[in-house]
Amino acid sequence: MLDCIVNRFVAALICLSVIPSLASAADNLGVLGSKPKWSVLANYQDTITHDEFAHLINDVYCTHGFAQDLIKIDNDAAQILTNRESRTTFTLRFASDPISKARIPRLWRPAKSLPSAKPDKPLGGLRIALDPGHLGGKWAKMEERWFQVGDTKPVTEGDLTLRVSRMLASRLRKLGATVLFVRNSTQPITSKRPGDFKELARKILIKNGLPQPRPDVLDPSDPEKQQTIRWQSEMLFYRYSEIRRRAVLVNTKLHPDLTVCLHFNAEGWGDPANPTLIDNNHLHLLVGGSYLQDELELDDQRFEMIRRLLSRAYDEELAISDTVATSMAKATGLPAYQYPTTLTTTKVGSSGYVYARNLLAPRLYRCPVVYCEPYVMNSKDGFARIQAGDYDGTKQINGVDQKSIFREYADSVAEGLAEYYRNARRKGD
């Protein structure tokens, strides 16, 4: 995700994220969210100890606090509010000790459960899904993942991530992995289009205090464009509907052991037709966590958080992310990005490059997720390397011999994954 772009969207995103579904007054769901199936959590009874649960709640998922009636942790169980209106709760029993824990129900396999592999095939038998961020192509301007300097080739994040994913797929297959694509073209996964969300967009704007919202964006630089039906309906399409459909694909058809989300970063570039190039260039990775208090008030997000917590995806994805971050930092030489605020993130892990954050994909994908955010596309170095395209060996860019940015990205992720699984798989089988 582009942090600079997100900052421009903050007000609109907060509105969208906290408005309940308009289908029923009794619903308390996020945007396009589904009613939680709380009964599913019965499969996790006695699979986690009190101390493990408390640690994950307090240090990973709810670092910004939460209303005390949402989750009550006792010695033997946790009481989780399922519906604020009816005041119903779900009781999650804790295992009495680590030895007594029941088997955790999940379709993905942690590294320690995999048999040892050949030295040159450390990813042998592993199912890895690649999720190139955004869409690119004709959708890039709508997504606001597009800028152009003069008559140079436009920079479109969705196309860049797709290019990297195809290179990475080749490398992972050579290391023994079965590679699955969440997206392998510039076509959306969702069958919906912006026009399908006009009425919902209008209702959202009215509920947020705009009794007569404007239908269209008159000027791309209009600071009030977020208050138009068109802008909101487009975001409902490419952000919420698209990512939710990708989650359905991951969870019901692909069933990976790991999903790698590939992105490029950026900072504020101003007018996309006359962007500002900057000196800053950096790297970071994201894992699921650090929910905001308002997000936890939503029944579906609270359910998704608890389900993910109980699957122990965090334990695996943090260890993998730290290893991949170290590999990427070594290959790129980039410093760790420092978020300007801790209101939405929590730094985790040991590498210094990984943050927990509540993003839609890491929350919904029912497997560990490694979410990569390297390179600032509108940095002077990043832009020059993107314009240089792909090439063998090295090329002098801004006075420095450098690999193709696409190969460097793909190589460093592959090397990090190979290192993690080489060290973490069972030995001696």
Image (cartoon, helix red, strand yellow):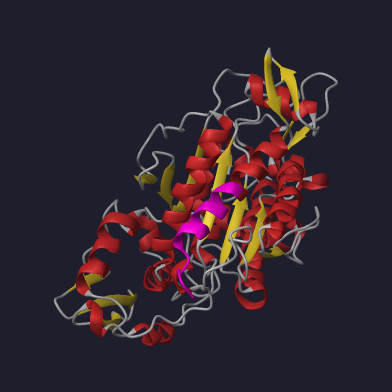
Residue lying furthest top: 399
Q: In the shown orientation, is residue 248 left or right of residue 137?
A: left
Q: Residue at x 24, y 75 (%)?
A: 49
Q: Residue at x 71, y 38 (%)?
A: 406
Question: Is residue 214 rendered magenta in the image?
Answer: no
Seen from the viewer's position, the closer of residues 8 and 104 is: 104
Q: Where residue 428 appears, x then y in whole percent?
A: 46, 72
Could one spot residue 198 in this view of the protein? no
Q: Where residue 338 appears, x then y in whole percent?
A: 42, 32
Q: Where residue 171 appears, x then y in whole percent?
A: 70, 52
Seen from the viewer's position, the closer of residues 422 and 205 is: 422
Is residue 414 depicted above or below 183 in this figure?
above
Residue lying furthest left: 75
Q: Residue at x 80, y 34 (%)?
A: 390
Question: Is residue 423 rendered magenta in the image?
Answer: yes
Q: Quadrant of the N terminus?
A: top right
Seen from the viewer's position, the closer of residues 194 and 287 is: 287
Residue lying furthest right: 151
**Which image quadrant is residue 190 in?**
bottom right
Residue lying furthest front: 428
Q: Where residue 115 appears, x then y in whole percent?
A: 52, 73
Could one spot residue 1 in this view of the protein? yes
Magenta region: which residues? 415-429
Instruction: Please state the total of marks drawn on the protein image.
Output: 0
Seen from the viewer's position, the closer of residues 314 and 185 is: 314
Is residue 70 depicted above or below 149 in this figure?
below
**Which image quadrant is residue 117 in?**
bottom right
Secondary structure mostly seen in magenta is helix
Q: In the shown orientation, is residue 59 left or right of residue 422?
A: left
